[in-house]
Image (spheres, rainbow, N blue to C red):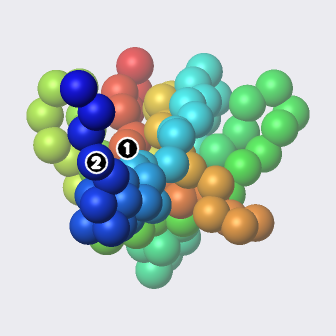
């Protein structure tokens, strides 16, 4: 039995392809080297490599298994960062394990 491909079905398939989330990368084992006073970004360093991560309205901060806030980010803390590349910038999705 063959299922006919209607224009509506094709449109739904094409639209859903563009709404899938981009893959995320993770970095851990480094430390926060600075936090922007305005709360829009922080710097992270691991083995002489430095990153600047942008904080967005979708960023989630976790302290262990509890919800955290931007004020929990301090210079020198070890963190795991899940992020997505957005052009030349790194947008932070999740900051996990502060102080682990």
Count neighbours of disc 1 (C-alpha within 10 A) and say few if under 14, some if 14 to 19, many if 20 or more: some
The answer to whether residue 2 is seen in the rendering is yes
Q: Secondary structure at mark 1?
A: strand
5 on left or right of 46:
left
Q: Are marks 1 and 2 in contact (CB under 8 Å)?
A: no
Q: Residue at x 78, y 45 (%)?
A: 50
Check the picture and name the quadrant holding the C terminus.
Answer: top left
Q: Which residue is mark 2?
A: 4
Residue 68's spot in the image, x, y percent? 21, 47
Residue at the front extreme of this rendering: 1
Dot 2 falls on a residue whose secondary structure is: loop
Residue in front for this viewpoint, 49 or 77: 49
48 left or right of 87? right
Q: Could you say where residue 83 lies in the image, as x and y percent from the top left?
A: 52, 46
Q: Which percent across, then down, holds residue 79?
A: 47, 32
To which residue does mark 1 refer? 94
- The nearer-to-camera label among 1 and 2 is 2
1 or 2: tag closer to the N-terminus: 2
Which corner quadrant holds the N terminus? top left
37 to the left or right of 66: right
Q: Relative to 25, is 64 above or below?
A: above
Closest to the observer: 53 or 100? 53
**Which residue lies at the image location 29% right of the left edge and 60% below the top edge?**
6
State the residue at coordinates (55%, 31%): 26
Quadrant in which residue 10 is drawn:
bottom left
Q: x and y percent of residue 60 in the render? A: 28, 50
Instruction: Mark yes or no: residue 70 visible.
Output: no
């Amino acid at each position: 039995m063959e299922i006919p491909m209607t224009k509506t079905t094709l449109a739904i398939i094409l639209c859903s392809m563009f709404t899938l989330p981009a893959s995320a990368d993770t970095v851990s084992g480094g430390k926060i080297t600075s936090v922007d006073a305005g709360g829009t970004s922080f710097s992270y360093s691991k083995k002489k490599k430095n990153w600047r991560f942008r904080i967005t309205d979708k960023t989630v901060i976790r302290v262990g298994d509890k919800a955290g806030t931007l004020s929990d980010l301090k210079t020198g803390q070890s963190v795991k960062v899940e992020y997505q590349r957005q052009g030349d910038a790194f947008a932070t999705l999740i900051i996990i394990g502060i102080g682990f």
